[in-house]
Amino acid sequence: MNYHWNWGVFFEETPEGGVQYWELIVSGLGWTLAVSALALVIALLLGVTIGTLRTTGRRWLIQLGNAWVELFRNIPLLVQMFLWYFVIPELVPPLKAWIVRADPVHAQFLAAVLCLGLFTSARVAEQVRAGIQSLPSGQRQAAAALGLTTVQAYRHVLLPMALRIVIPPLTSETMNLIKNSSIALTIGLAELTFRARELGEYTFSFFEAFTAATVIYVAVAMAANRVMAWVERRLAVPGYTAGGGR
Amino acid sequence: MARFRFRLFAALAALAFVAMPAVAEELAGTLKKIRETGAITIGHRESSIPFSYLDDAQRPVGYAMDLCMKVVEAVKAELRMPGLKVNLQPVTSANRIPLMQNGTVDLECGSTTNSLKRQEQVVFGPTYFVVNITAAVKADSGIRTLADLNGKTIATTSGTTSVPLLKQYEKTAAIDVKEIYGKDHAESFLLLANDRAAAFVMDDILLAGQIANSPTPAAYRIIPESLRQEPYSMMLRRDDPQFKALVDKAVGDLMRSGEIEQIYEKWFASPIPPRGTNLNFPMTPAIKDAFASPNDKGV
């Protein structure tokens, strides 16, 4: 390819003036991390709850959990983002009233966090369910035999083991979540991919812009991977869990 | 010495031209690629009414598409390939230049501003339209001028020339606005329609297109001010003089023969798909000038 790389483009001034392009990329990274972190919190809280409900043996709880997972898992993420940002506010007049007055960035951030958090919660729920169901049924029975209530059995016996088992798939989900946050550019949130596209469109240095974005995404996803591997090691029960990621 | 060599080269070139008029020029660049693959790929837009957009059958149609099809006819004649296959590739504001550069599309037919900055990456055919960049607002909003937008939220489409222009205007006119970005014109217009934004800043003809296609065209008005005039033209790859000359001639002939006026009428002053709306957008003096003297000057 006969392409003239121009890495100096990151130190050129933007049309806004007073700001260089690398600063835009860094601010984009900030939004990517903020959206991903908050969405991860929502995804883990809801995902663990829903996933647990789906193993309780109560019919209506299981159906509720299944409906949740199927709803958020079966609609494309891009469509969900559009629904949260454009459609839901039209159906909820007070929300609409707030959005019209608020700084547009807040509405974009809220929509992106909710969308990504709920979408990922469905996937986390599926993994938590699988983790709990992978435990030998003897554990649940032993807990009952000891006189533990259902809640106590989950709190002290089942969840501590199941959650350790699902750390590796949750690591993948975390990395996916970070990458999925780029979908927020479709509602105008100025995250990393948005900034890379912006840099490309203003300077036409698309290859430089997206090379930078690629390197940053890889670095962030790898960092998340390392953190999760550390968590996994710290929490490993000697001689029991696989303790991967070493 | 260099000068002499150039003269010698020019003389030889002229001689070659005179001596062998019947021998076809060695094909290079895009034409060579078209000959070898048996296909030409046209990049089109999906909601740039009436230049290049999808009709009710999801086929790309429009003023720019009609002009591009004339270029395709010229390519068929030039290469003597009546069965040439035409591939249609949707492009967006943000990906049209990379897709042009990496060879995915050979000719982009949309609503692309011919800017000097873009000319560093691609080249343009003759100007076929001239727009004013301005804002569409709700008719009952009380906004009469661009200065009235102070303190408001303004929608625009990310990746377009309107974005830096709006930022410059903010500085020079000392107004303060919040920008929100739609990923395409339809989405930016939706932001205005839903009152998420007080205005949609874009090229006047694209605003007229969005308004004509909305359920309530009377509810919107276009501010009669201009941030800037911009020429539209088809985009092609750089350093490809053969294909550029072919495009210039094909489009220039339409302008010189006056045929382009009928094509203009068809898209800007008659009912167009998908809903039979009429944009009622007569030729402006700038557009008449562009047709009178075909040129590829950028801004």
Image (cartoon, rainbow, N blue to C red):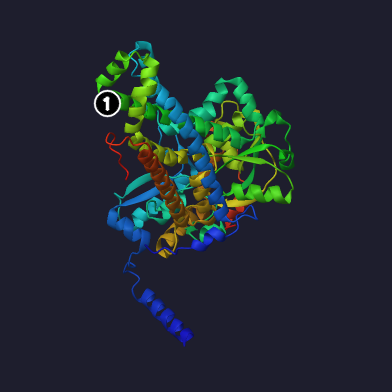
Residue depicted at 33% across the width and 19% down the height: A55
- From the viewer's side, name the closer residue of A159 and A42: A159
Q: Is residue A43 visible?
A: yes
- Nearest to the observer: residue B298 or residue B195: B195
Q: Which residue has dot 1 on it?
A: A134
At x 45%, y 83%, the residue is B7
Residue in the foreground of this view, choosing between A72 and B155: A72
- Disc 1, SS: loop
Taking B31 as reference, is B133 left or right? right
Place of residue A230 in the rendered image (x, y in percent of width and height, measured from the top left)? 39, 43
Percent position (x, y) of residue B188?
A: 56, 36
Question: Is A235 on the left-hand or right-hand side of A206?
Answer: left
At 30% from the left and 39% from the top, the residue drawn is A243
In the rendered image, which quarter contains the C terminus of chain A?
A: top left
Above or below for B7 versus A39 = below
Q: In the picture provided, is A46 more to the left or to the right than B151? A: left
Q: Hey, which residue is sitting farthest front in the picture?
A: A146
Q: For this view, does A36 lie left or right of residue B162?
A: left
Q: Position of residue B211 (x, y in %)?
A: 59, 33
Q: Exactly how many numbered labels are in the figure?
A: 1
Q: Residue furthest top?
A: A59
Q: Quadrant of residue A22?
A: bottom right
Residue B266 seen by the camera? no
- Asked where in the image residue B294 lies, by quadrant, the reply is bottom right
At a point 63% along the width and 47% down the height, the residue shown is B132
Q: Quadrant of the N terminus of chain A?
A: bottom left
Q: Amino acid at mark 1?
A: Ser
Give the letter of the chain under mark 1: A
Residue A52 percent coordinates (x, y): 37, 21
- Label 1 crowd bin: few (<14), some (14–19), many (20+), radius 10 Å: few
